[in-house]
Image (cartoon, helix red, strand yellow):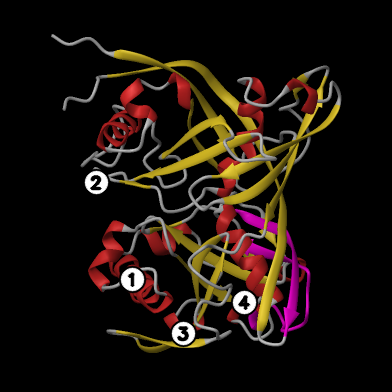
Amino acid sequence: MLQQIKIPATYMRGGTSKGVFFALDDLPEPAQQPGPYRDALLLRVIGSPDPYGKHTDGMGGATSSTSKTVILSKSTQAEHDVDYLFGQVAIDKAFIDWSGNCGNLTAAVGAFAINNGLVDNHRIPENGIAEVRIWQANIEKTIIAHVPMQDGLVQELGDFELDGVTFPAAEVKIDFISPVGEEGAVLPTGNAVDSLAVPGEGELKASFINAGIPTIFVNAEALGYRGNELQEHINGDPEALARFERIRAYGALKMGLIKNIDEAQARQHTPKIAMVAPPSDYTASSGKAINGDDIDVQVRALSMGKLHHAMMGTAAVAIATAAAIPGTLVNIAAGGQTRNGVTFGHPSGTLHVGAKVTMQSEDCDVHSVSMSRSARRLMAGWVYVPEPQS
């Protein structure tokens, strides 16, 4: 009988997500390069594919927010500290999507990098804030994580509360620098609003935004929703999920991310699909009462085929960008005025995101998008996994 191999790993929460973090050099040599061996290894770590949808035999949590892997290494890029590679692991398929970033787990990257010697000591203050310069390898973008330090150690505990996370922790500010994706302009079609033809839906109004992560925004009302729904209203309805996936696939085609509609199945992580609505009162999933006067807009986004329990960090970047561009569906739902930040409602509560955007005629330059998250180590040691067989 074969024996399991053990690999140093850290289980971390970042924002409203959690995942298994690895230092590149700690992986078995065949997994230090992209390819089938790496994917097979990480799938087994998470426990996918799992036809039962439980991840009982792995480290995953059987949701898009908790089926994640991260590989970090000293940066190969000038003026950066760490290279960050993210893999979104499918639950019921033998598939890892490497096409995008996880903005939530970004909050944990700086802490892991410091704790694992990936940041030079002279860049880490004894007390204060360590600015960790992250090269996001999936999308080839720079992110700055402002990690609090106390007595030479990463400060993980604090009183910062983040809707969607049960317990308070230390605040980690994240700056996404020039977050427009390489697929094209902020508005990939050149329009703030487009007409999107979808079988069974007719012509839908849609805003396509390429910032943080490619995202398709549609009006909740056009789909028969209020825009303040919680997970159970969507995820328990197979027809609704199929409908959103169909809109996402045709939106991906319109954005130029795929060449034919069938390719959407192999690109589950991107683009995201979200519905927007004007602010309204609602009760969050925690039971917290949200006053519509305290938010600018309602947003509900899907990730890996399910309504997210809060909001993906990268989608929050897209939301803030869209809110700052006059005429997008997000901007209109938020009242239509010029803004450099937005507070939006999501199933778990609210989130404020700031954006520095410059409009020049029809062009839009996104300088940076900023938000506050938190992160915490949950466990450190080794993961045990059967070695993939070639």
Which residue is tagged 3? 222
Q: Residue at x 38, y 34 (%)?
A: 60
> On the image, numbered disc 2 is attached to which residue?
93
For marks 3 and 2, give the one nearer the viewer. 2
- Chain-order first, disc 2 or disc 1: 2
Q: CA distance from mark 3 to mark 4?
A: 14 Å
- In the image, taking residue 179 as reference, residue 8 lies left or right, namely left
Q: Residues within 10 Å of mark 1 (few under 14, many from 20)?
A: many
**Residues at badges 3 and 2 in contact (C-beta under 8 Å)?**
no
- The residue that appears at 66% across and 29% down in the rendered structure is 111
| Residue ID at (58%, 46%) | 104
Q: Tell me the quarter of the picture where residue 51 sits.
A: top left
- Inspect this view and state whether residue 15 appears: no
Nearest to the observer: residue 141 or residue 61: 141
Q: What range of the chain is rendered magenta?
A: 332-360
Tell me how far mark 3 sits from mark 1, CA to CA: 18 Å
Q: Quadrant of residue 346?
A: bottom right
Q: CA distance from mark 2 to mark 4?
A: 33 Å
Residue labelled with disc 1: 249
Amino acid type at mark 3: Ala
- Dot 3 or dot 4: first in sequence order is 3
Instruction: Please tell me which residue is depicted at 25% across the width and 19% down the height of the picture.
Output: 386
Mostly what secondary structure, the magenta segment? strand
The secondary structure type at the circle numbered 4 is helix
Dot 1 falls on a residue whose secondary structure is helix
- Residue 330, numbered circle: 4
At label 4, the amino acid type is: Val
Specify the amino acid type for callout 1: Ala
Asked whether disc 3 touches disc 1, contact meaning CB atoms under 8 Å apart, the reply is no
User: The residue under label 2 is which amino acid type?
Assistant: Lys
User: Within the magenta stretch, is there residue 336?
Assistant: yes
How crowded is the residue under tag 3: few (<14 C-alpha within 10 Å), some, or many (20+)? few
